[in-house]
Amino acid sequence: MQSPDTSNDDSPKAGGLFLAFLSVGLSGFGGVLPFARRMLVERRKWLSESQFNETLALCQALPGPNIVNVSVVVGSRFAGPAGALAALAGLLGAPVVIVLVLATLYGRYGEAGRVPAMIAGLGAAACGLVAATAAKMALPIVRTRPVSAAPFIVLAFIGVGIMKFPLVWVLMVLAPVSIAAAWRFRA
Amino acid sequence: MKGASTGLLGDLASQFAVLSLVAFGGANAVIPEMHRQAVGLNHWMSDVEFANLFAIAQAAPGPNVMISTLVGWKVAGIGGALVATIAMCAPSSLLAYFAARAWERYRETRWRVAIGAGLAPVTVGLVGSSAWLLIHAADRQWRLVVVTAIVAVVAYVSKINPLWCLAAAAALGLAGALG
């Protein structure tokens, strides 16, 4: 995946990767993956649908923010280490600046007037969005593998959410067993 | 936002570097661990402050990883924000950079499929834990619980841009309807 895609004469350089991921970073709220797909597959046609799915599967199996992994893998695929850095910087640069401006405003005016009530409303909506994301992710798993996979949803929730065990312990216990169950399911 | 000691920056760097390498399922899967360390172990902030930072991260454009930027900012200002962001992204990015080559070689092999399929349910449980934790931290009275429930249902059944849910809830708060 490291060698530049020679079949495509429009292979992006570092500058193009920076700008493309800059637009992705600024386009989404609470997760930008759908926008990355639109940019890479539909608008710029840098990746085919299946190449994108392949890249995404890799990035979801690896630890770390998925979209950050996508930017690194796509950037390096077209322009090596410089491309990876450019895509990463493009993705994170503007959002970091914006979020720090918001944080500074919050630090200064967070207690003023009705601002706390506004932030409370935002916070309540934000956790509703996360709950919906969890439910959407759970649905296909519960449907297709109710016995071999769904119990691990519950166990991970109990371990981290209810018992508040350190994440590393929970992963070390659950991940191998869950992967073994998936292995047997495929057999 | 006082002058950050190197010790504090070092703590941020090491904690987020570890989070980076266990963040299967992305940043939203490690919210409980981030909270455990920032609120429970290190007392860097209160429950409510953590929930507020998460709300701000969601209301800003960009990837979910912005919550780590804000935790770093809370602990040690701009320097802390940069250290936490880089520590959260660098280890996993390096891993992704090198794994991309190996991955191609083993495509469609059975163990690769099993790893993906096995991690998925654990990840879902972790994102569910994040929602659970944030609800406990953010919903301090019943009106906020109602907002959370409505947003969860709307976001689940419709394809509406989440920004509208956030904007509506913020407007209700500003109007004094959630006090």
Image (cartoon, coloured by chain):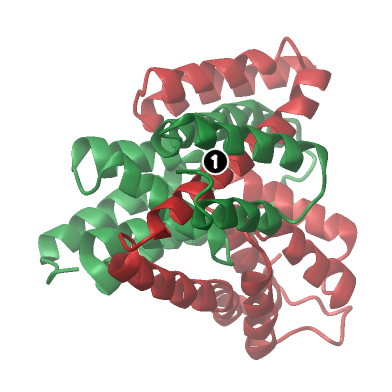
Left or right, residue B44 beside residue B50: left
User: In the image, what residue type sits under mark 1?
Assistant: Cys
Which residue is nearer to you in this view: A100 or A18? A100
Q: Residue at x 51, y 61 (%)?
A: B93
Which residue is nearer to you in this view: B55 or A186? B55
What color does chain B have in the rendering? Answer: green
Percent x, y for residue A106? Answer: 36, 65
Location of residue A30 with respect to B125 vertically, above or below = below
Q: Residue at x 61, y 77 (%)?
A: A80
Q: Secondary structure at mark 1?
A: helix
Q: Residue at x 33, y 56 (%)?
A: B71
Location of residue B179 with respect to B63 vertically, above or below = above
Question: Which chain is painted in red?
Answer: A
Percent x, y for residue A39? Answer: 79, 71
Q: Residue furthest front?
A: B176
* Chain identifier of the residue bearing label 1 in the image: A
Left or right, residue A163 beside residue B29: left
Location of residue A114 with respect to A168 vertically, above or below = below
Left or right, residue B67 beside residue B108: left
Q: Quadrant of residue B112?
A: top right
Q: Quadrant of residue A105?
A: bottom left
Left or right, residue A162 beside residue B95: left
- Residue annotated with mark 1: A127
Percent x, y for residue B161? Answer: 75, 56
- Classify mark 1: residues with Cα within 10 Å, few (<14), some (14-19) or many (20+): many
How many numbered circles are shown?
1
Q: Residue at x 63, y 67 (%)?
A: A71
Inspect this view and state whether residue A166 appears. yes
